[in-house]
Amino acid sequence: MTEMAEIEVIHLDDESSAQEERADHQVAEVEPEASRRDEILVETEAHRLLEELEAQKIDLEKALLSLLNKQEELVMWRLEMEV
């Protein structure tokens, strides 16, 4: 290979390496952003699910309280019937 051709090959290799480095750098910049977006989506969904569970818990507590009140009414009714 002639000296000029060797210089051209080295120059192309250097350009290729530089392009790879730029591409790697761009990927390295984008990955954390994408990861953070995914993290935010997961946090948002987790928060929504926690709120939903809290609402269900409140509904269950109300239903339990209602059942306890009905049970108390039945006990009082039975006591009245025994008298």
Image (tube, rainbow, N blue to C red):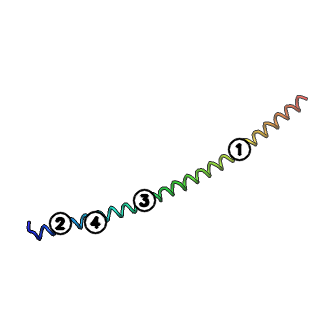
Could you tell me if the residues under marks 2 and 1 are in contact, i.e. CB atoms within 8 Å?
Answer: no
- Specify which label sits upstream in the sequence, 1 or 4: 4
Residue ID for mark 3: 32
Q: Position of residue 18 (x, y in %)?
A: 27, 66
Q: Can you say whether 6 is above or below 74 in the image?
A: below
Residue ID for mark 4: 19
**Label 2 element class:** helix
Three-letter amino acid code at disc 2?
Ile
Image quadrant in which the C terminus is located: top right
- Specify which label sits upstream in the sequence, 1 or 3: 3
Image quadrant in which the N terminus is located: bottom left
Q: Is residue 49 left or right of residue 61?
A: left
**Residue 61's disc number:** 1
- Number of numbered discs overlaid on the protein picture: 4
**Label 4 element class:** helix
Residue under the image location 64 percent in, 49 percent down = 54
Could you tell me if the residues under marks 4 and 3 are in contact, i.e. CB atoms within 8 Å?
Answer: no
Residue under the image location 72 percent in, 45 percent down = 62
Q: Can you say whether 72 is above or below 32 in the image?
A: above
Estimate how packed mark 4 is, as few (under 14), some (14 to 19) or many (20 or more) residues with alpha carbons within 10 Å.
few
Residue ID for mark 2: 10
Three-letter amino acid code at disc 4?
Gln
Could you tell me if the residues under marks 3 and 2 are in contact, i.e. CB atoms within 8 Å?
Answer: no
Depth-wise, is mark 2 or mark 1 nearer the camera?
A: 2
Q: Position of residue 72 (x, y in %)?
A: 81, 37
Estimate how packed mark 3 is, as few (under 14), some (14 to 19) or many (20 or more) residues with alpha carbons within 10 Å.
few
Residue under the image location 88 percent in, 31 percent down = 81
Residue under the image location 85 percent in, 31 percent down = 78
**Residue 1's disc number:** none
**Label 1 element class:** helix
Estimate how packed mark 1 is, as few (under 14), some (14 to 19) or many (20 or more) residues with alpha carbons within 10 Å.
few
